[in-house]
Image (tube, helix red, strand yellow):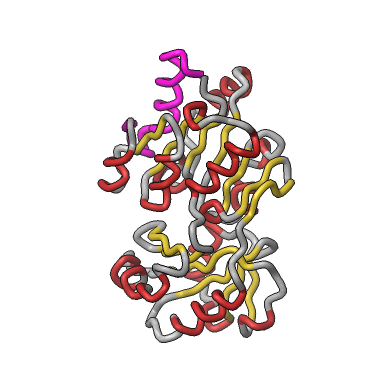
Amino acid sequence: MIKIIFSDMDGTLLTSENKLPEGFDETMAELKKRGVIFAPASGRQYFSLLKSFEKYVDEFLFLAENGTIVMHREIEIFSCPLDPAAVEKVLEDTEPLENILRVWCGKKDAYMRREHNTPEFQAELGKYYTHNEVVDSWQEIDDTPIKVSFYDATGHAKENIYDKLGQFYDSLQVVLSSDFWVDIMSPGINKGEAVKNVQRILNIKPEECAAFGDYMNDYEMIQAVGYGFAMANAHPDLKKVAKFETLSNDERGVLVGIKKLIDEGLI
């Protein structure tokens, strides 16, 4: 029987209008009644996830920042910080990238440089990092780094960012999170590794877990569970490793998939 369900947010659980699907609360009530934990697993900041699920703070398990930090009932149960020296090198070496905005992501906050503090970027940043601070230099930050994120407003993050970070592929985890975002994290960490740590800590087997995703930062997570679902709108490479497919995020695909699991007696 399934004991925990992991779900990506953007392009997966949330509609294209950035809203929870109709019937979400009713489905969560049914999962709670059956003793199943729901776990948002996102590249978003932990505080952003809390804001999205204010009434579920004491119920949900949160995998934030692409699995670099996992929180349950406001207590950290797992994290994988970045080496500060690696962060410094990443930021230094990517300085020449044109029209690319960078975010220094820490446990306490997310930080952006003052010269990038435009209304447009703040609007985009606010979707994923509700706690953010403007700094004059990276050196003034007093926090534990867990991720560095890059944003391309043109929606060509693979060509303009990911493909230009080849020098870090072997030493760090470089992930294409969407058409707009690329994330750099500690080597070996991803949503899948975070799921495995949750399984170990909670003594839950992979076959007792389900997961839903749509993009390449969900790739390892889908493989780390017994019931991996790709959305209809998912990246083609993700569909190749998912055992199941559900409807798109705008068709309540996550809820449809959960109902399928219930109907088949797996929950």
Q: Is residue 176 above or below residue 232?
A: below
Q: x, y percentage for residue 140?
A: 69, 81
Question: Magenta residues?
Answer: 244-267
In depth, the one of 185 and 187 nearer the eye is 187
Q: Position of residue 154 (x, y in %)?
A: 33, 69
Confirm whether the magenta stretch covers residue 146. no
Q: Residue at x 59, y 63 (%)?
A: 146
Magenta stretch: includes residue 256: yes
| Side of 197 relative to 215 (left or right) | right
> For residue 177, which quarter of the picture?
bottom left
Residue 105 percent location from the top left of the image:
59, 66
Judge from the rendering whether residue 131 lies leftward or rightward of residue 251; answer left or right: right
146 on left or right of 102:
right
**Image check: 183 left or right of 162?**
right
Against 97, residue 46 (above or below) is above
Foreground residue, 86 or 259?
Answer: 86
Q: How many marks?
A: 0
Q: Is residue 256 above or below residue 164?
A: above
Which of the two residues, 60 or 188, is positioned nearer the viewer here? Answer: 188
Relative image position of residue 45 (x, y in whole percent): 59, 56
Residue name at image x 57 percent, y 47 percent: 63
Q: Residue at x 65, y 71 (%)?
A: 133
